[in-house]
Structure formats: C-alpha cells, structure tokens
Amino acid sequence: MLFIAFCKALDECQHCFHQWQHAAFSFLLAAQRGKQECLYICPMDAKEMYMRRCFELARLGEGFTAPNPMVGAVLVHNGRIIGEGYHASYGQAHAEVNAVGSVQPDDKNLIPQSTLYVSLEPCCIHGRTPPCTSLILQEKIPEVVVSVLDYTAEVRGKGLELLRSEGVKVTAGVLAEEGAELSIVRNTFVAKRRPFIALKYARSKDGFMGVRGRQVWISNRYSRRLSHKLRNRFDAILVGTNTALTDDPSLDNRLWYGTSPAKVLLDRNLRVPPESKLFHTPGKTLVVCEAMPDRHSYPEQVEFIRCAFDTELPGSLLQNLAGRNISSLLVEGGAVTLNHFIDQGLWDEAWIFTSNHRLGEGIQAPPLAGVEVSGFQLGSDRITVLHAISRRKFSAEIARLSACS
Ligand code: AOF
Ligand code: ZN
C-alpha cells in the first residue's frame, strides 16, 4: 500500500522538478498516518493553484472596484480551502475581509493555522475601510502568500514589511506576471499619476477609420457588444469633436451588464451642440474646451474643464482626470484625438477592430507599434489587442520587484 502511495505521488508530481522529493515525502506521510493512499500536492503547484483561484475570484469584481484594484483572497488550512472572497465594489470590504468572513463557524478555530493567499499585497492604511494587515494580525493568520505589490504610495511593500515585523511568514511574487497584469490599472494609476489608457478604434481592411464628415459603420454587431463590454471596464470614455459631430454617440454601456463610464469630450470651440446625445445619457459629461461655455444651455450633469489646446493637452487633462479619481480611460477616437495620445506615448493598451470590408479612401487609421497579446476573430471582424512597450516594461518591473520583496 505504501508503495502505491509512493507511485501515485510520483505520478502526480511527474511534471514537477521536485517529484522524487515529493514522492518520498508522500510515502513517509502515508506511513506516518497509516493510510492506504495519500494525495500529495506539490507545494509549488499548490501555491500557484490557490493564487489562480485568487485571480479568478478577483475578476468577479471587474468593472465595479475602480479606482481600487480587483483583488481575490483564499484561506487554506491543510490543503482545504476554508474561506474565499474578493473585492466586489469600491468602498466595500476588501478581499481578505470577505475571505475571513466566509469561514464557516465550525472552521473558525482553524484560521490561526491557515495560510492566506491574496492576489495583491494586503493594505496597511485606513482608506475607506480599515487596513487588512490589522485583520491578519488580529486573526493570528501565521502565513500570507501574495502575488504582487500594491504600488499605492503609502503601501508599496509596507504591508508586507509590517506583517513580517509581527512574525507572519510572507511569500511574495507567486505568479507575479499574471498578478501584475491583474492589477495593472490600479498600479498604473497610482505610480504614473494618470489613468490607465486604452485606445479603441475600428478600421477597414484597407486601413481606413472612416470618411470625413459622414458616419460609416465599420465593425459588426458582435464587435459593438464587445466595445460596450469594454465600456463597463473603464471609468471614463473620451471622444473628439469630429466623432461627436458625425456619429452623435451616446457613449454609454447599453449592450453589456455593469456600469457606464463618465464621458469626456474634447471640444476646443464648443462646436458640439448641447442637444447631442452624449450630454443627455445618464452620468457625468466632462467637456474639455478653450472657449467660455454658456452653462445654461447644457444639462446639469455637464461639467467644463477649460485648458489650452497645445502640446500639453493630453498630459494636463490626464492629471485633471486622475484628480477626479478616474483611474482608467478608453479613448475611442477619432483619428485626430487618437494621435494626440499616440504622439506623446500616452497609451497602455489598444483594441483594434478590423473589418473584412474595404473603404477605398478615407481617414487613415493611426499606425501603432506595440506587442500583440491577443488576436481573435469575431464574426467577420478581426480583433487585435496590443500592449504598449512602456506598459510591458512597467508590468515586468512590478513582477520583478514583487518577486524580490
Ligand atoms: C487589499 N485588498 O481587496 C483591495 C485593496 O480605500 P480603501 O479602504 O478601499 O483602500 C484602498 C487601498 O486598498 C489601496 O491601497 C488599494 O490599492 C487597496 N486595495 N487592498 O488589501 C483589497 N481592494
Ligand atoms: Zn485591504
């Protein structure tokens, strides 16, 4: 029987570098417990397995947590998950609190012998909720496993330090590349002091975004749904004057569940008429202009940001938006607006929808250099997702720093 336990462990750990060690360990464990067989999970794989579960949980909060990150947490006792949680909504309980809170009464006494897995470094500050580090210490959780650091200035490694100084065993950097991507929006927002920026545009097969002065539908209806799904993920959506005039877009999220972004319109001379749809769909509209607005012509939820339309424009606007807690921005065009951001390297991600029709002529889609991370077919449209080189570097830096924290 013990031999069977040994073979089983060897088989289960066959892709693992430590397989012989684990098989031997499993053999001893089985002998010690007098069990016929003993399931043994490689501790390396186990850490990653629980962290993957944290990532899965975290994503359940997508679209609802901003400007906070998506975070998931799992509490494990002796190979059994006794609690799980995620940050579901801004201002509400953090993932760790929900994970601890979900432990059943019969298992509560196990918390001081359990390991807490969290996709992000536990916070050590009083924000809208108390620090998670206090909860961990109060619950006497002896071990915490984290994927990546929280770059919020007052946290950034201090959460881990505090736990260690109180005798908690802390491991950071588990699945750090994935963890860095999961929290890239928050970490970009707090480290670069500007919203995370995604560009989104549709282009014809021959590379045109549209025809000047006339509305042209390029992408198909599945792509429209996907673009509304993106609107749920972003705090704000931005368009320029020409797009607002030719398309009269609503800019809200009607085709996907969740929230609609705040709307931002670049309209230097206030040429977009107050009766345009985007001023009347629910939610705030911010109009960036140089001209003095006639406030009373617009609905109450319209606000004006007056700034010079010079080379400083994207930078100063982004600062203003960050001050309003807008942590992510979806720039939907048109070409002039997109180029404002591209020319200054102010973008992190791009979603390009390429149809299989040719337009023959029109406004050239902007050329973009980035790393293609995803490409898939959505009916007749091809969707390409690019990451800016600067974002790749930043993400890699987060992963590297987290692994040696
Ligand atoms: C965690 N777990 O689930 C989340 C964290 O204003 P508050 O109270 O929401 O706290 C803001 C801080 O918490 C900030 O550092 C943010 O990055 C972090 N988010 N931290 O330990 C969580 N969502
Ligand atoms: Zn917290």
Image (cartoon, rainbow, N blue to C red):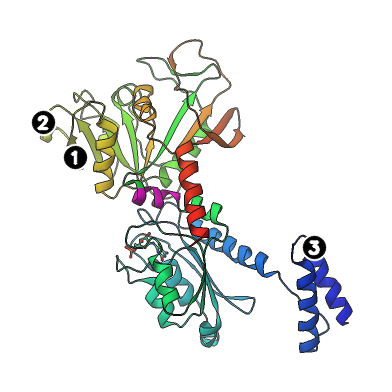
Q: Nearer the viewer, mark 1 or mark 3?
A: 3
Q: Residue at x 44, y 32 (%)?
A: 200
User: Under 8 Å from ligand 1: the CB of mark 2?
Assistant: no
Residue 95, x across and y down, in percent: 45, 67
Label 1 element class: strand
Q: Residue furthest front?
A: 404
Q: CA distance from mark 2 to mark 3?
A: 72 Å
Q: Which residues are magenta?
A: 184-191
Q: Which residue corresponds to mark 1?
A: 303
Q: Residue at x 86, y 82 (%)?
A: 2
Q: Residue at x 45, y 70 (%)?
A: 96
Residue 349, x across and y down, in percent: 46, 38
Label 2 element class: loop
Main secondary structure type of the part rendered in magenta:
helix
Residue 128, x across and y down, in percent: 29, 65
Q: Which residue corresponds to mark 2?
A: 294
Residue 14: numbered disc = 3
Q: Is residue 186 magenta?
A: yes
Q: Amino acid at mark 1?
A: Glu
Is residue 182 depicted above or below 35 in this figure?
above
- The answer to whether residue 370 is visible is yes
Identify the mark nearer the N-term, 1 or 3: 3
Q: Quadrant of ligand 2?
A: bottom left
Label 3 element class: loop
